[in-house]
Amino acid sequence: NEWWREAMISAFRDMHGFLCSLTSEIVAPGFAEASGPPSLGGSLDVSAAAALGAKSTLPRLDSRISGTTGTVAFVLPGQRLLMAHVGDSRAIIGTRSRVNSGPWRVSDLTRDHKPDLPDESARIEATGASVVAVGTPPNSTHRVFSSHQTWPSINMSRSLGDLHAHSQGLTCVPEVLLTERLWDPEVEEAVVILGSDGIWDVVTPPVAIQVVAQAAAQGQDPAAALAKEAYGRWGRRFLQGNYSDDITALVKFL
């Protein structure tokens, strides 16, 4: 278990280091190669990262005030899952009997990394930053804030990128989970959903499982069906500018 954990942590730190390298090339071209690996990054060689960025057809990234969540799921022999996760995207699993197609049993595979979680807020506040409540229910959230900061406050406690906020206690280190056996393929079916917070802010996990299962039974794309359901629910909130949070879903039946 410890080997898997260290491997996943190294992978997430490497990706964060890659974002640091690309950002340093924007802020101060040539600085990354001259100064060595960025203090907020991982073990990825900086010159290699810069070379990768130079060859990329994607635009250069400035990760000081932008970043991403990261959720990875490996399906292992024995119906076990290896999960690694940062941010407020979420992974869930649903299982049910193949015999009588009974009700789905739904479980979270990750927890949302929000600043108001006790262990997360302790790390943030140790840097001198604060966790503040913003907005009014049901549209309220908690954000990380420091006096005199000049960048937007973030509502997550872990991320890849968001380099400014990493000076306030954010971390790119994932939580890693190696599960026990989760289902018996002889008598049970299972489905795993990875989704961004634009789904989970408006769709509960049991409803999400029902939506993808029904779509699959009807020969439709289950991920597209879930995204459409979430987008419709955002629209029915009648927020300014028809706002919806980012909606991304990956669905795998097992």
Image: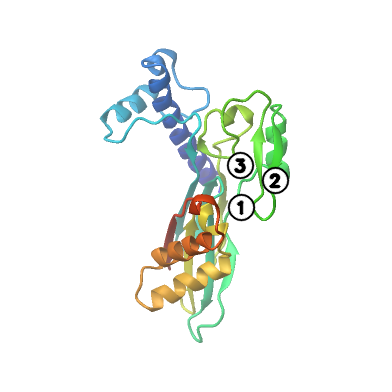
Q: Residues within 10 Å of mark 2 (few under 14, many from 20)?
A: few
Q: Is residue 6 left or right of residue 49?
A: right
* Residue at the disc numbered 2: 117
Mark-to-mark CA distance, 2 and 1: 10 Å
Q: Are marks 1 and 3 in contact (CB under 8 Å)?
A: no
Disc on the earlier residue, 2 or 3: 2
Q: Which mark is residue 155?
A: 3
- Tell me the element at label 2: loop
Q: Nearer the viewer, residue 154 or 192?
A: 154
Identity of the amino acid at label 1?
Arg
Q: Position of residue 155 (x, y in %)?
A: 61, 42
Q: Position of residue 51 (x, y in %)?
A: 30, 26
- For numbered disc 3, what is the local secondary structure? loop
Give the vertical position of 180 relative to 145 (above or below): below
User: Which secondary structure, mark 1?
Assistant: loop
> 83 or 207: which is nearer to us?
207
Of the image marks 2 and 1, the number of the one nearer the N terminus: 1
Give the mark nearest the N terminus, 1 or 3: 1
Q: Residues within 10 Å of mark 3 (few under 14, many from 20)?
A: many
Q: Nearer the viewer, mark 1 or mark 3?
A: 3
Quadrant assignment, res 174: top right
Q: Which residue is mark 1?
A: 111
